[in-house]
Amino acid sequence: MATIHPVILSGGAGTRLWPLSRPHYPKQFIALTSGRTMLQETALRVSDTAAFAAPVVVCSDDHRFVVAEQMRSVDAAPAAIMLEPVARNTAPAIAAAAAWLGESDALMLVLPSDHVIRDTAAFRSAVARAAVAAEAGWLVTFGIPPDRPETGYGYIARGAALEGCDGAYAVARFAEKPDEKTAARYLARGDHAWNSGMFLFRADAYLAELDRLRPAMAEACRKAVAEARADLDFLRLDEAAFAACDAESIDYAVMEHTDRAAVVPADLGWSDVGSWSALWDAVDRDDEGNATVGTVVAVDSRDSYLRADGPLIAALGLEDMVVVTTADAVLVAPKDRAQEVRALYDALREGGHDEADQHRKVFRPWGSYEGIDSGDGFQVKHITVKPGAKLSLQKHRHRAEHWIVVRGRARVTRDEESFVLEANQSTYIPLGAVHRLENIGDDPLDLIEVQSGDYLGEDDIERLEDKYGRS
């Protein structure tokens, strides 16, 4: 079997798992079913065998440093981190990765970064079966055998077996998400599978079909890669070329129209974790059927998902419910309405609530900051700087800052001065002063920042120098 090149798609917004998952920090970056994030689990699934090359990760510019750090922390060095300047769905993202691979007969294994697969051995076995069909020019998708009449997934109808490709079948048709009666009929027939959103094909075979079916998209993606530029450890696709693509999924653009679509049935313990009820189904539960995370006390409650990433949850008499707390939001919903959380998210955005898109804790390439308090003319933050990291050399037009070191050692630059602060020491950064904060210790640096001024927005930063290319 030829070497397989994983292509990990990390562009989703993850709003169906609000408030834990939000567009600025979606579910693929969160540990939902294990001690690792879903992106890390995806990368590790294809990283410890010679069958797989280093992965290509496709993500948004906003998430680039989170992706790089999460991959680094599990020693899953990517071949490339490709940055989408605008969101254009999966068909263009995959085309850009195919073009980057040189339009060769290289096998591409396309993997969403936010799916759960419990049986890694079955996954790799299915990939090996699919590779035989992919090398023969088929565009292979993986079909999950349904165990219930699920209405939240699309379906794939299996056709004739492919000659010489054991375990692979031609696709008879793709079906949209059905109603319950239709889903029950698919389950009873036994020839339908859930559409997993995972694919395996040759790079040149995919681009050839895209040339035939969406020639403008194929041309734009090739141009976006040809005119891409390196930026630190990232590859920035050309914005004008990529933005010219229509936003289409690979299913709509290619798979539903090609005569080369194949499916490999694969029982992997798979879930797309597309709702809180799906997450409840994907994790371990106690004798009462409750899935609990964090500090939770449940009395006379059953079959519920209770997650405290914020305040303690004290649940009494709950049944088939979802309760999720974070530092700045609480979700309470019946489990059978979990698919409607996206509508709730839309209502929050329409109401102008910042909590819709952004957590109170915001990640940066140097570490993170978290809002603690704010009011008229002031704002308080908890700042954490990673060992060896430093913020940009910068100044502000509208605010002054007070820094109090809680833990660690900081080097402070303030205009012409440079000095070290230890725990329980503080300093003042006047309005307009050129300044920088650096962690010179071996442990994380924690400090409290008090901002004061007539405007405290994050855009009041004039970067003069930045090691992360943000100047």
Image: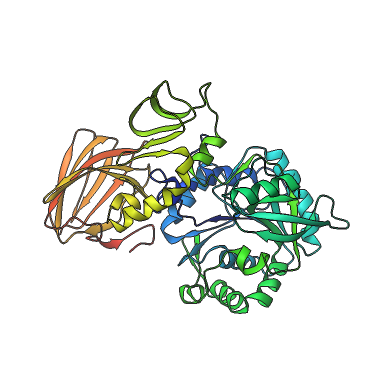
- Give the image location of residue 96, x and y in percent: 58, 67
Q: Residue furthest right?
A: 164
Q: Residue furthest front?
A: 181
Q: Is residue 99 visible?
A: no
Name the residue at 43% across, 53% down.
65
Name the residue at 68% across, 60% down.
174
Q: What colouring does the structure picture have?
A: rainbow
- Give the image location of residue 333, x and y in percent: 40, 39
Question: Considering only vertical position in the picture, is 282 above or below 262?
Answer: above
Name the residue at 63% across, 37% down.
118
Question: Position of 114 compared to 448: left or right?
Answer: right
Q: Nearer the viewer, residue 58 or 470?
A: 58
For the C terminus, the quadrant is bottom left
Q: Nearer the viewer, residue 98 or 115?
A: 115
Question: Position of 72 compared to 449: left or right?
Answer: right
Question: Residue 406 appears in which quarter of the rendering?
Answer: top left
Q: Is residue 471 visible?
A: yes
- Give the image location of residue 123, x and y in percent: 70, 44
Question: Residue 331 appears in which quarter of the rendering?
Answer: top left
Q: Nearer the viewer, residue 242 or 467?
A: 242
- Give the image location of residue 95, x and y in percent: 61, 68
